[in-house]
Structures are given as structure tokens and as C-alpha cells.
Image: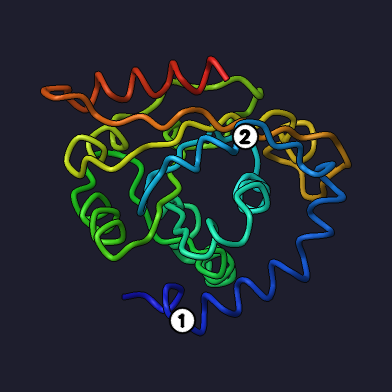
Amino acid sequence: MSWQFSTPAVIARETTAQLVGPLVSAIVGGPRVVGREHLASVDGPFLICPNHSSHLDVSTLRLALGPRRRRRLAAAAAEDYFFTGHRTLAFLAAWLGGFAFRRHGANPRSIAEIEGLLARGWSVLIFPEGTRSRTGEMAPFKPGVGLVATRTGRPVVPVRIVGLHDVLAPGHRLPSRGRVEVRFGEPLRALPGEDARAFTARLEAAVRAL
């Protein structure tokens, strides 16, 4: 298992979250959290799938989840952006629980890693759009998350993050203060006979409806 999932790394990450959390909270205005009660019905590891518009998405979502849910949260991070020739970016991504995820073309290795993390009791954050929105509008979801959901049967929590594009949009180096809302939806599970694309379409509709 990669170092970011070791017990010392988990403890260090949570210590850092306690120190840095108040700063992130001040920047994003909380965030305001809606629907967190939906997580109460989730037993064991799950997939969590928000829209993606900012480099602050992961930190904000970790705040919204709280210490218990974020302790064993891994995050799929774009291999070509974070883990190819950029040691500082790779370290920062891993420090937040990130692991390299191939977002273009077939990615059986990445899918297998997600399945392995779920089997070891880690919940996994996946951005189904595959990249940050440049406009703030959601892009169509890629079917990788549907493949994992249909193969593992694990619950998938849809999430809508509102307002972060105005706080730190792609191309901006420094954030501005804003009011961000994180909306959790009811967990979804793959239906009998449902294929990856059908599940992905259902998940996308659920996120858009939040």
C-alpha cells in the first residue's frame, strides 16, 4: 500500500486538517453543509462523487465530511497533472490522500486500485467529470465510476459543491473569500443488470438535481 495510506500518514493528515481547517473554513464560508444525514445510512467504504470546479474541492469536501468520514478517504487524482514530472504536486496530492488515476483512455490499473482500496476499507473520492470545469458548469460524467459501482456493489454518494468556482477557479493562483455549499444526496447502488454507462447517467442526474 502507498505511504499516504499508512497509519502515520493518516494521523499526520488529520493533524494538518485540524491546523489548516479553520483557514479553509474562513475562505469558503463554512462551508454550509446540506444532506449530511444521508451518510448515516452508509455502512462501510463508499464512493463519493462530486462535481469538480476548483483545486479546493478536496479540502472543502473533507471539511464537510468531518473527522470520522475523512480519516479513511482516498482521492483519485489525475495522473497526468499531479504525478508526471511534478514532485511537489505529487507530494501534495498524496498528502491529501490522493493516488494516481489515469483519466484518459482505458484505465484497468486505476480501476483495480480503487477496487483494492475499497476492499481494504477505504472510501474513495472520484470526480466523474475527469477535470475541473473552466466555466463553473458541469461537464458530462465519464463511465469509470459506473464501472467501479457495478463491479463492487458499493454505495455511491452524489455530491454537489456550489460556489467554489467563484472562490478559486482554474487559472487562478490565490483564492478569494466566498460562500460555499456542499450538498450530499442519497446514496445510490448499481441495480441488477445495470451497466456502467447507465449507472453513470443516473449518478450524473442525481448530482445535477442537488
> Which mark, by number, is residue 155?
none
Q: How many marks?
A: 2
Who's the residue at 17% across and 22% down the image? 194
Q: What is the quadrant of residue 1 in the picture?
A: bottom left
Q: Is residue 114 left or right of residue 128?
A: left
- Identify the residue at image location x=40%, y=54%: 123
Of the image marks 2 and 1, the number of the one nearer the N terminus: 1
**Residue 187 against residue 77 in the figure, above or below:** above
- In what element is the residue under mark 1? helix
Residue receiving disc 1: 7
Contact check, label 2 and label 1, Cβ < 8 Å: no
Query: Mark number for residue 53?
Result: 2
Q: Residue furthest bottom?
A: 8
Counting from the top left corner in percent of width and height, residue 34 is at 66, 31
Q: Amino acid at mark 1?
A: Thr
Image-quadrant location for residue 209: top right
Image quarter of the C terminus: top right
Q: Foreground: 188 or 75?
A: 188
- Front position among marks 2 and 1: 1
- Answer with left or right where residue 56 lies relative to residue 92: right
| Element class at badge 2 | loop
Q: Nearer the viewer, residue 207 or 153?
A: 153
Task: Give me the residue at 28% from left, 24% from top.
Answer: 199
| Disc 2 from disc 1: Cα separation | 30 Å
